[in-house]
Image (cartoon, rainbow, N blue to C red):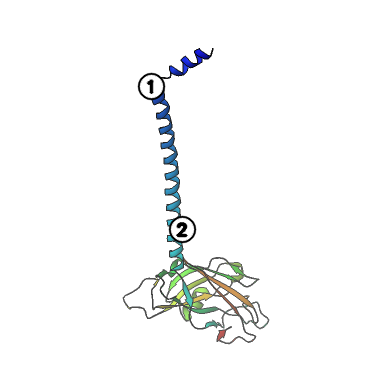
Amino acid sequence: MTAAHSDDENGFTGLEAAIVLIAFVVVAAVFSYVALGAGFFTSQTAQSTIHTGVQQSSSSFELIGNVYGLQDDTWICDGPNNDCLAYINVTLGLTAGDTPIDISQMVVSYNDGQSRWPNLTYSGENCGGPLISQVWHTDAAPSTTTGSWCIAQKINNASTDTSEILNPNEQFILAIQMPYTTTPNTQFTVVLMPPEGAALTVTRTVPALITPVQILY
């Protein structure tokens, strides 16, 4: 039996050895392809993450100056003295080194604990003054509907630039409608979410006495 076993080993041909070698090469090639593919995928994912992070961090704006609350005599409020804010004015500018932002694509939300507007409607540009009262005044309580916001004025904006893109060194004054629940001593929060970048949260309190125009703190 020992001799027969020795004869079997001697009968192991070069062809069989070649087949085994080819099998090892194929397995190694497949393994290498899988490993390289995983490496490329990881590299592309990391590159995409870095690119998104840079894009997000380079697209942001900041609040410039004070936030003003404005009253409208035709506004019917929930308060005992029929006092509430009709809208607020906020001024936005890009933070240093940031890229332009399309303000019209921004999402604006409002919440004061009683009224909640998750997405106010954008109503265009040049909506300052009486136009706001005409467009926004309604007999239906806004606290149960959706409010509006608009670009009231552009500062340092070229006269030929009619776009809604906020560029470096420019400032946009926004008019944001308030619900009837912005009565005295009410704290509210407005969140401005650009299409890319960090959101800007503005929290203010309505003063105890509401006048036609007041700075909100």
Q: Quadrant of residue 32?
A: top left
Res. 161 mark: none
Along the viewing direction, whichever of 90 and 199 lies nearer the viewer: 199
Residue lying furthest front in this view?
3
Q: Quadrant of residue 27?
A: top left
Q: Quadrant of residue 204?
A: bottom right
* Numbered disc 2: secondary structure: helix
User: What residue does disc 1 label?
Assistant: 15
Left/right placement of residue 161 relative to residue 153 reads left
User: What residue does disc 2 label?
Assistant: 49
Along the viewing direction, whichever of 63 and 205 lies nearer the viewer: 63
* Numbered disc 1: secondary structure: helix
Quadrant into which the N terminus falls = top right
Q: Label 2 is placed on what type of residue?
A: Thr
Q: Label 1 is placed on what type of residue?
A: Leu
Residue 179 appears in the picture as rendered: no
Left/right placement of residue 9 relative to residue 110 reads left
Q: Position of residue 172 (x, y in %)?
A: 43, 77
Quadrant into which the C terminus falls = bottom right
Left/right placement of residue 124 relative to residue 69 reads left
Q: In the figure, 190 relative to 39: above or below?
A: below
Q: In the figure, 112 relative to 44: above or below?
A: below
